[in-house]
Amino acid sequence: MSAPGTPGAAGPPEEPGTPGAAVFAGVDLGGTKIQTAVLQGEKVIASARELTPQSGVAGDVIDAIVKTLQSALHEASLSDEQLTGVGIGTPGEIDAEAGVVSLAANVPGFGGRVELGPLVSKQLHGVKVTVDNDVRVGVLGELRRGAGRPFGNLLGVWVGTGVGGGLVLDGALRNGRGAAGEFGHMVVKPGGRRCGCAKRGCVEAYAGRARMELRARKLVKRGQKTDLFGIMKRRERDHLSSGVFAHALEHGDEMAEKLIEKAAWALGTSLASAQNLLDLEAIIVGGGLGDRLGQPFAERIVGYMRPHLFVAEHPPVVLCTELRDLSGAVGAAVLAGG
Amino acid sequence: MSAPGTPGAAGPPEEPGTPGAAVFAGVDLGGTKIQTAVLQGEKVIASARELTPQSGVAGDVIDAIVKTLQSALHEASLSDEQLTGVGIGTPGEIDAEAGVVSLAANVPGFGGRVELGPLVSKQLHGVKVTVDNDVRVGVLGELRRGAGRPFGNLLGVWVGTGVGGGLVLDGALRNGRGAAGEFGHMVVKPGGRRCGCAKRGCVEAYAGRARMELRARKLVKRGQKTDLFGIMKRRERDHLSSGVFAHALEHGDEMAEKLIEKAAWALGTSLASAQNLLDLEAIIVGGGLGDRLGQPFAERIVGYMRPHLFVAEHPPVVLCTELRDLSGAVGAAVLAGG
């Protein structure tokens, strides 16, 4: 169940917790929404969602995180004091030791340095708060509680505003020297489209929603027709959300079709490169756009990956997420120890 | 020192072994030469090299391997009985358990199935013989006894007839499900040049010596000038060897320059993709062409890698091999336990 007045979570239904097991909560902090989940043992016993405050004040976002946690706990008939730990997945650069986030430009008020962990902890009786990258946390959720459970070696590809990745080998998320998993910045077309990272030809330049929107605006300027921006306005959005793309695709919008096809091409081609290097068991496609477009999108990606596989007779399994938009919140709770 | 009448090995000078330490030998089996090394403790105490018999009879190759091992042992004033183990690095598909090699098309007589391990063991008083892939074994040599020693996370890129790879994470070579490390089949240009694997746009299609030769022949047919094939004939070679490319480069041959530049582009661009995914500490460039062209080639590769690095301020170290053409033989001895 979700908190009253907030949009319902699309994840699996909540179940009764394991009596006596420790309670952990997870928070998926995004630029538009804050999603929380409360876990007892292996079970998700409650979840809640709030829109991310757009005031530009970090304190407002912190308050909203705490409120969303409290409403999920309330539903589960639990109090703050019964929480063993809280995990938070967030965009930006993370100092996990200090629980500090920097440069999370998409979250209003988080453009600078925010002591996210300590500030949330302070409002929750000093409970331990652990902070990590939103994509890593989402992949962790799927690995331990979702589609990734049967596998020890997989790549999670999170397709949203940008394209993120989480590489799991021998059951553990790889860190490298702190920057492993940047699948979105594999080079799919040397000299190709400009990416948000200012380089050319990255996967994200073709498959990240922000760059796809830029491309659509350019094509419209050149006189091409699309209903993408019409749908955006009718839905009162200020950007081409995953829902806008999905709606346009369902209605046969030609530009949306071409953009999504190109995204699948970029993702599939680079997944083949990653697969040839790593020989993984599975690939999990998640993130806002990945979750929204689901299995048909995963199949398009496979169509572009398959012709480039070096060991064609032994391809990786390509799956959608199982927890859907709860991947991040559940993963954050797992990160905290849940 | 090398056996009389064979070309000298370019590796480090042999040193006296650790007295009393176990003796291991390694064999690097190639289509043109067989290189062995004898290790006592951490030291290479002897090495020998023979040309690979071209009769097409597998037994002749087995005999030559044994002979090369015996001449290295003889130099070290050791007998067969003092060997604790032998390792062999070979092209082809390997059944490590059984010591069997299949489809090593480049080695005369090895196109089918050869019981390499058992056949060599039989001629050496039943000593234990361990067999693995030539590139993996070369990377292992550099990791444990060469340029890779300071690093736990690296990618070995072996540039020769084809392009192979060996991925090391946390100090161990990754296997995946048996096919990890195929760096040569990362896709650098979707829809690009045809590769030896029949797919398009692989790194090997641009940076493998065999495909570079095919390209050179095509350009000559189109009327372009080069001294590559003249050098080949004067050196009495039947293919464009690494030495032929090196000589042509030194003499300012324009086609050789363009081919090597394109190879560096393919290697550098794909290394950036691998780096963005894995955040490695080091990259080691080896193999016949890599060893022959050395540091200037590594620097060309870095020039193409750098502009695509996601974390530009923290690039991987890019190194040439330290053991040069002994990487494989030393790695094979390490594989055997040395």
Image (cartoon, coloured by chain):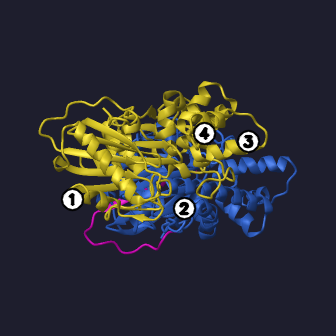
Chain colours: A yellow, B blue
Q: Nearer the viewer, residue A320 or A162?
A: A162
> Disc 2 designates what residue?
B285
Q: Which residues are magenta?
A: B11-31
Circle nearer the viewer, 4 or 2: 4
Chain bearing mark 2: B
Does A82 sit left or right of A275 as displayed? Answer: left
Nearer the observer: mark 1 or 4; the answer is 1
Mark before the other along the chain sequence, 4 or 3: 3
Q: Position of residue B261 (x, y in %)?
A: 70, 60
Q: Of the residues shown, which amino acid type is indicated by label 3?
A: Leu
Give the percent coordinates (x, y) of residue A60. Answer: 39, 55
Q: Nearer the viewer, residue A256 or B273?
A: A256
Q: Quadrant of residue A231?
A: top right
Q: Quadrant of the C terminus of chain A?
A: top left
Disc 4 or disc 3, which is closer to the eye?
Answer: 3
Q: CA distance from mark 4 to mark 2?
A: 33 Å
3D distance between C-alphas at marks 2 and 3 = 43 Å
Same subunit: marks 4 and 3: yes
Counting residues from the start of the chain, the first of labels 1 and 3 encountered is: 1
Determine which residue is flagged by label 1.
A126
Task: Tell me which chain the residue with mark 4 is part of.
Answer: A
Which residue position is annotated with label 3? Answer: A219
